[in-house]
Amino acid sequence: MVLSEPYWDHHIPLPKLGPLHSRLVTAFVALICFINSHDGDFVFDDSEAIINNKDLNPGTPLSNIWKNDFWGSNLSSNSSHKSYRPLTVLTFRINYLLAGGLHPIGFHTLNVALHCVISMLMIDVFAILIGGLVHDGRGVTLNLSPKASFLAALFFAAHPVHTESVAGIVGRADLLCALFFQLSFLVYCRAFQGGDRKFSVLWIFGSILLCAVAMLCKEQGITVLGVNAAYDILMVCNLNIYELAHRLLSRRKSADVGGLVQSGLLMRLALLFLGGSFLLYARWRIMGTGPPSFTEVDNPASFAENVILRIVNYNYYYSLNAWLLLCPWWLCFDWSMGCVPLIKSATDWRIVWPLVLWCCLMGLVSQALCSQDSNKRRTLTFGLVLLVIPFLPASNLFFRVGFVIAERVLYLSSAGYCLILAYAVGYCCCHWRKHKRLLRAATLTLLCVNVARSAQRSQQWRSEQSLFTSALSVCPLNAKVHYNVGKSLADRGNQSAAVKYYREAVRLHPKYVHAMNNLGNILKERNELKEAEELLSAAVYIQPDFAAAWMNLGIVQNSLKKFDKAEQSYWNAIRFRKKYPDCYYNLGRLYADLNRSIDALNAWRNATMLKPDHSLAWNNMVILLDNTGNLAQAELIGKEALKILPKDHTIMFSLANVLGKQEKYKESEGFFLNALKINPNVASCHGNLAVLYHRWGKLDLAKRHYELSLRLDPSAPGTKENYNMLKRKIEQRQRTIG
């Protein structure tokens, strides 16, 4: 490679810093953009990937992360998303282990640190892509474009579209993938340290290995092989694609093929191809049952019957992604469910945007291929390579993806945009020298605006309430946005406000069964049972295998005294979800209401077998056996429950009542006192302990606990009468003694 310093580099309106200082400044900019997310909560997809993912728990076998997907589901399951990212899950598990539990600050801090490291490494990547890989006599890598690579890295560090990947903990997958993507590229470049005609196969294998590691963090990592190949062709072999194509098309003698063989290009490309093919084959085998299945609401364009409509809408999605890179002001955590309505006719004005996008891309491609300026040609080509190749897995070209737009998939592609933007700044400063101050001010303003927007957006990602609310102005037609706002409000106890958003979600998407289910639950708690039944019935009609909706429908029907229908709904829920302890519990309550005691006990026993710590099921068994006079069996069940739940005061209370009826006063007293140690403000516990002392003849202790019970609940049923009886008994005893 015979390369020279890009002529436009010294026109970049930035100070020329040394390697260490430029890296520190870049890391600092990345830090101030996203540092305010470090103490945020678990939000949005973090619930499924982290909070509900058993693979993070140190008690779960470590081998499970190699068998399950990113969300903790077995890869062989038809419901699995097939997102195989075991190394990302491993870092979550390490976070969990170091923090001693699910404390989000450690998770967030590592994400911010990774973004800082990636931003620093971008200087090295950009330096090679702009100025080539050049070493001095001591083998030290020289940066021929210090200002351009520094500016591009600053643009990357501060780009607001990265907020989802950095502030959202599940974005760890994108960060780790990007880190090993960079390392794979840098190691591939290392293979040519000996000169143009010499290369190290060992370093190339190292690059392929790092590509495999990137894939184990996120599937997008495979695309680094395409970037490596482009670097080899365009930089190492210095091939002019335009000239080569022109010669081939005009049937003139093409470039010296023997020279390419001699340079090892064909061999290196073969290694990359074979390595990539092996990784793709291994990834396909790991998926087991084939690709994941997505619904129309996830990616409506991919379900359009007309091929032309599919192509037009895919291109419209591409233009929206490009707009997010150019103007990252309208950012949203989710772009599905009507957020981006389909283009269905040629009269839709939005069809202009795909045309604008392709005109811009064609202009860039023509400049990248046909320009006489080798520096310009090289920089724009690599900018396009970095922009397009990492985006290909999300493009719907090879397989259907489960989203319309996802800001996280632009994390790597944004590097290509930042490289093109840095070149544009340098080009303008070089050719418009009279306006250099204005260009310097514009560049500084752009950086400051991006930093401010990134800080603002990462602040919104600190909590679900602020994240979901921020989306209302961006995607007011997105039913999922309204659903999540409603869910956040309901979780915080504001059910009246939640109802409004759930209703809007159902209005925007009449088949949104999860919104129907949650709205039905709130209406059930507000005793608006008829509407709740209608909503839940509609939900199970739309999605017959929706087990949670079947169970909730059974609860509502039970409250409406439609016992036969309720029983059928419960069994439908169990049919669609075999291991459903809460449904068995509710089925047991139905049987208890119908005085079918044996059936109730069997249902509750099933609940405790499926979920051994199901406190309510254990307690109801003890109470039912107590009420039916089976005191010995109630005692056995109560003691069995306390072996599993040794600090459950409700079971202690129920068992103490059973023992008291068997006149096992001392043992009963112990359970009452233990229950009161755990929860000393339960009036009924003091009242029943007082009754025990009353029967036992310990009248002073009985008097004390009656008084405590009445102080906590003056209207406690029966307690005042028992207390008055005790006082009369004490007075009689005193008169007798006197």
Image: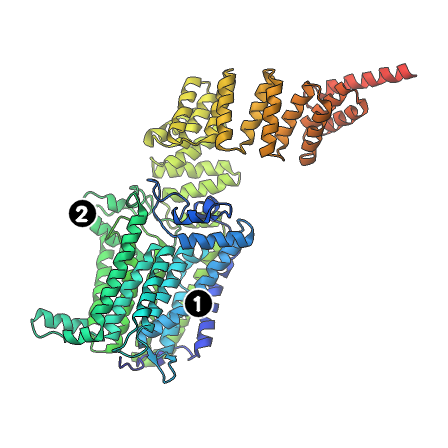
Q: Which mark is residue 448?
A: 1
**What residue is drawn where x is 43% and y is 56%?**
172
Percent x, y of residue 351 = 22, 53
Q: Quarter holding the C terminus?
A: top right
Q: Earlier in the sequence, mark 1 or mark 2?
A: 2
SS for dot 2: helix
Q: CA distance from mark 1 to mark 2?
A: 43 Å
Q: Which mark is residue 80?
A: none
Amino acid type indicated by mark 2: Val
Amino acid type indicated by mark 1: Cys
Percent x, y of residue 714 = 71, 25
The answer to whether marks 1 and 2 mark residues whose Cβ atoms lie closer than 8 Å is: no
**What residue is drawn where x is 22% and y is 45%?**
344
Which of the pair 247/60 is nearer the observer?
60
Which of the pair 495/578 is nearer the observer?
578
Q: Is residue 581 above or below residue 55?
A: above
Find residue 187 and report its image quarter. Answer: bottom left
Q: Is residue 91 above or below residue 491?
A: below
Percent x, y of residue 416 = 31, 66
**What residue is drawn where x is 34% and y is 73%?**
190
Which of the pair 453/653 is nearer the observer?
653
Q: Badge 2 is on which residue?
A: 307
Coloring applied to the structure? rainbow
Which of the pair 479/545 is nearer the observer?
545
Instruction: Count neighbours of disc 1 (C-alpha within 10 A) and say few if under 14, some if 14 to 19, many if 20 or more.
Output: some
**What residue is drawn where x is 29% and y is 42%?**
296
